């Protein structure tokens, strides 16, 4: 059995390990945190925010995300995860009349259901009216998905090491990793999924990947479940509903 070491246990590293176990390739995940920095904090919207502004290549990667997440959930539900953590309440986007035709053309091309709808129809007193609603899109509850993936992977024999990789050096075959706690691993295959920490690690292999963190702000409100029925997106911010109201 081949062995792969994955640096970073956020959504990218865990889904990488998930795909490897399906191919009967054994994986070890090293993460300095409990797993997932951006992946824990992320809103979990399962589509680009303004998909029509992206290239076809990006759209090919993302247009069937809901269907693929339904498949993923069918394997994970019951492990700290409920079907309600995949919220299929739709995505409403504030779009002005100038952009509306582009949106309609995009939706037709990719077979995505859409309707022109005022924001206040979904959320009374919402101050933005012009917009488009995609009823088949939605969002996922990130922290629970991460927990479920870790539980699934552990049951499939994936090992997790809580440590920070401080050195990554190329070898004739694979790479040598060293951690903050002095662990040394020689791995034939290493996948770097360390989020914003990836640039530092990859620079040790001579690969330049200029990345930098961007500051944002997220607020958590407890509301009556269903009060915000769908993701509501405007240029100045967005609302993301959770099934339990949080
Ligand atoms: C507030 C917010 C909202 C967002 N909303 C959305 C959204 O709605 N939809 C969407 O698609 N995307 C969203 N994103 C973006 C999305 O969350 C990220 O693109 C995604 O989670 C990145 O996953 P990752 O696994 O690459 O990185 P991370 O989740 O950051 O995981 C990287 C992991 O690597 C570990 N690590 C780093 N360096 C080392 C090292 N040297 N040794 C060991 N471990 C290391 C870290 O501890 C971390 O756990 C949002 C992001 C934020 C911050």
Image: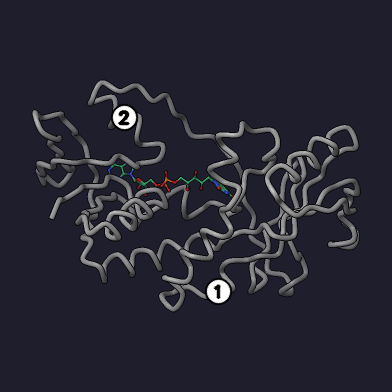
Disc 2 residue: CB within 8 Å of ligand 1:
yes
Return the residue found at the far bottom.
78
Q: Which residue position is annotated with label 1? A: 83
Q: Where is residue 51, by image quadrant? A: top right
Question: Residue at left 64%, top 33%?
Answer: 54
Which of 224 and 157 lies nearest the eye of the viewer? Answer: 157
Q: Where is residue 227, by image quadrant? A: bottom right
Q: Is residue 210 above or below residue 162?
A: above
Which of 109 and 184 lies nearest the eye of the viewer? Answer: 109
- The quadrant in which the N terminus is found is bottom left
Question: Residue at left 61%, top 48%?
Answer: 47
**Mark 1 or mark 2: which comes first in sequence?**
1
Question: Residue at left 74%, top 45%?
Answer: 107
Taking the image as shown, residue 38 lies to the left or right of residue 173, namely right
- Where residue 146 sits in the image (x, y, percent)? 42, 61
- Where residue 90 sits in the image (x, y, percent)? 72, 59
- Where residue 76 sits in the image (x, y, percent)? 42, 71
Helix, strand or loop under label 2: helix
Disc 1 residue: CB within 8 Å of ligand 1:
no
Q: Is residue 40 above or below residue 206?
A: below
Taking the image as shown, residue 211 lies to the left or right of residue 240, namely left
Q: Which residue position is annotated with label 2? A: 200
């Amino acid at each position: 059995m081949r062995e792969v070491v994955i640096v970073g246990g956020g959504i990218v590293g865990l889904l990488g390990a998930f795909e490897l176990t399906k191919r009967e390739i054994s994986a070890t995940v090293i993460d300095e945190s409990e797993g997932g920095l951006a992946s824990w904090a992320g809103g979990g919207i399962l589509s680009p925010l303004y998909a029509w502004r992206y290239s076809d290549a990006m759209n090919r990667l993302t247009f069937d995300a809901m269907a693929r997440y339904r498949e993923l959930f069918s394997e994970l539900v019951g492990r700290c995860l409920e079907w309600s953590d995949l919220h299929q309440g739709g995505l409403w986007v504030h779009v002005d009349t100038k952009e509306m035709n582009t949106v309609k053309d995009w939706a037709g091309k990719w077979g995505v259901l859409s309707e022109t709808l005022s924001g206040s129809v979904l959320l009374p007193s919402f101050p933005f009216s012009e917009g488009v609603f995609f009823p088949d899109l939605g969002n996922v509850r990130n922290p629970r998905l991460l927990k479920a993936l870790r539980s699934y992977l552990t049951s499939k024999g994936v090992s997790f090491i809580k440590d920070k990789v401080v050195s990554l050096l190329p070898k004739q075959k694979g790479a040598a990793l060293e951690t903050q706690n002095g662990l040394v691993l020689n791995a034939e295959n290493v996948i770097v999924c360390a989020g914003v920490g990836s640039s530092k690690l990859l620079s040790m292999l001579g690969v330049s990947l200029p990345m930098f963190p961007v500051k944002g702000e997220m607020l958590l409100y407890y509301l009556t479940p269903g009060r915000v029925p769908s993701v509501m997106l405007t240029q100045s911010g967005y609302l993301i509903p959770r099934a339990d109201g949080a």
